[in-house]
Image: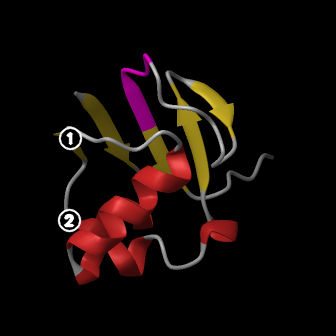
Amino acid sequence: MIEILYFAWVRERIGLPREKVETSAGTVSELVAELSAREERYALAFSDLTALRVAVDQELTDFDAPLEGVREIAFFPPMTGG
């Protein structure tokens, strides 16, 4: 079971701040494909991966990151600093 966290407009499009999912996906990309196939709201949220960042167990990573042993994944838009 993996906990998925959604932030900012990703949360708004999906309509949930978090959820727990069981997945057979081996990578973040495969998980995104599974989620996108669920419902239109997920497909919309994940339609442009260049507009998203991902963290696996609170470490920034890329969408090819493996999911073995992962407890938490977070999706969010790029952050700007100031």
Predominant secondary structure, magenta span: loop
Query: Considering depth in this image, is 27 or 79 the residue closer to the camera?
Result: 27
Question: Which three-letter amino acid code belongs to the residue tagged 2?
Answer: Gly
Mark number for residue 15?
2
* Lateral position of residue 26 relative to residue 52, left or right: left
Q: Residue visible at 47% across and 54% down? A: 30
Give the foreground label among 1 and 2. Answer: 1
Q: Residue at 36% of width from left, 20% of height from top?
A: 71
- Residue 70 painted magenta: yes
Question: As rendered, which of 29 and 7 lies closer to the eye?
Answer: 29
Q: What amino acid type is highlighted by mark number 1?
A: Val
Q: N-terminal of the two: label 1 or label 2?
A: 2
Rate crowding at label 2 as few (under 14), some (14 to 19) or many (20 or more) other CA atoms within 10 Å.
few
Front residue of 70/72: it is 70
Residue to which mark 1 is pinned: 21
Residue 65 visible within the image: yes
Looking at the rendered structure, the secondary structure element under dot 1 is strand
Q: Where in the figure is residue 48, as x and y percent of width and height?
A: 59, 76
Residue 18: x percent and y percent? 24, 43
Q: Is residue 32 above or below residue 40?
A: above
Task: State the image quarter where residue 51 is shown.
Answer: bottom right
Is residue 31 toward the left or the right of residue 28 in the image?
left
| SS class, disc 2 | loop
> Residue 62 location in percent, x, y?
69, 44
Residue at image position (63%, 36%) is 65
Q: Position of residue 9 (x, y in %)?
A: 42, 67
Compared to residue 25, the image places residue 55 above or below, namely: above
* Quadrant in the rendering for residue 66: top right
- The answer to which image quadrant residue 55 occupies is top right
* Residues shaded magenta: 69-73
